[in-house]
Image (cartoon, rainbow, N blue to C red):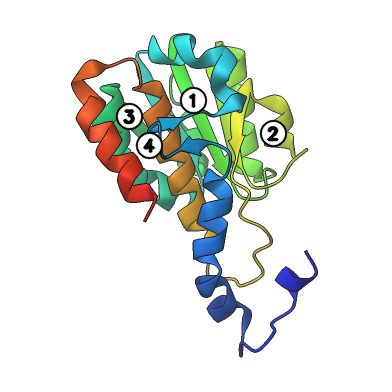
Amino acid sequence: ELDQIMKGNFPHFMLKEIYEQTESITNTMRGRVNFDAKQVTLGGLSNFLSDIRRCRRLLFIACGTSFNSAVAARPIIEELTQIPVALENASDFLDRWAPIFRDDACVFISQSGETADTLSALNWAKKCGAICIGITNTVGSAIARLTDCGVHINAGVEIGVASTKAYTSPIIAMVMMALQLSDDRMASLQRRETAIQDMSR
């Protein structure tokens, strides 16, 4: 932890954190991806997998960098799960009070787990009865506590204003989620195995 908040030999934190991305991505996958068996296990989702697989759509709600990570992950999530994916900027979502249904699964992404607009959207989704999933970097944060299940990205401290680790690690977390959700679909077996093999590089 102390090493992460020191610049070391780097001129600034952003450059240091760019080089730390290989380690942070590895930490996100550690203990969750079995590359030999080509299997992904996210313990935080295990009790809700069947409910998420039955949902009518996956609704990703976030702000800023977290929203952009969902944009990047969307194609492979839809390809693997065959579940429609909708993306919502949390602040815009709240302006419209967009409809959420009980058979939706809502994924809330926040590095801090305390983003105000994302938390407000989470409270609205809970009132609507949807399954709420959190992807956050902070154990014990509000989003980690209030969601039904979730994934901790283990990216470590990020000090630089321009995001690096808090962008790439959530993408990996969402890809792992898609891989586990699709592990009961024989049609996606080859694509899943290729994706897991690519993650090992």
Residue pointed to by mark 1: 106
Tag 4 near tag 1, CB within 8 Å: no
User: Which is in the foreground here, disc 4 or disc 3?
Assistant: 3
Residue closest to the eye, 82 or 185? 185
170 versus 119 height, above or below? below
Q: What residue sits right under mark 2 in the picture?
A: 144
Name the quadrant of the N terminus: bottom right
How far is disc 2 from disc 4 in space, using C-alphas?
A: 20 Å
**Residue bearing the label numbered 3:** 85
Q: How many marks?
A: 4
Pointers 4 and 3 in contact (C-beta within 8 Å): yes
Q: Amino acid at mark 3?
A: Val
Look at the image and tell me in which quarter the C terminus lies: bottom left
x%, y% of residue 27?
Answer: 58, 51
Observer able to see residue 9: yes
Q: Secondary structure at mark 3?
A: strand
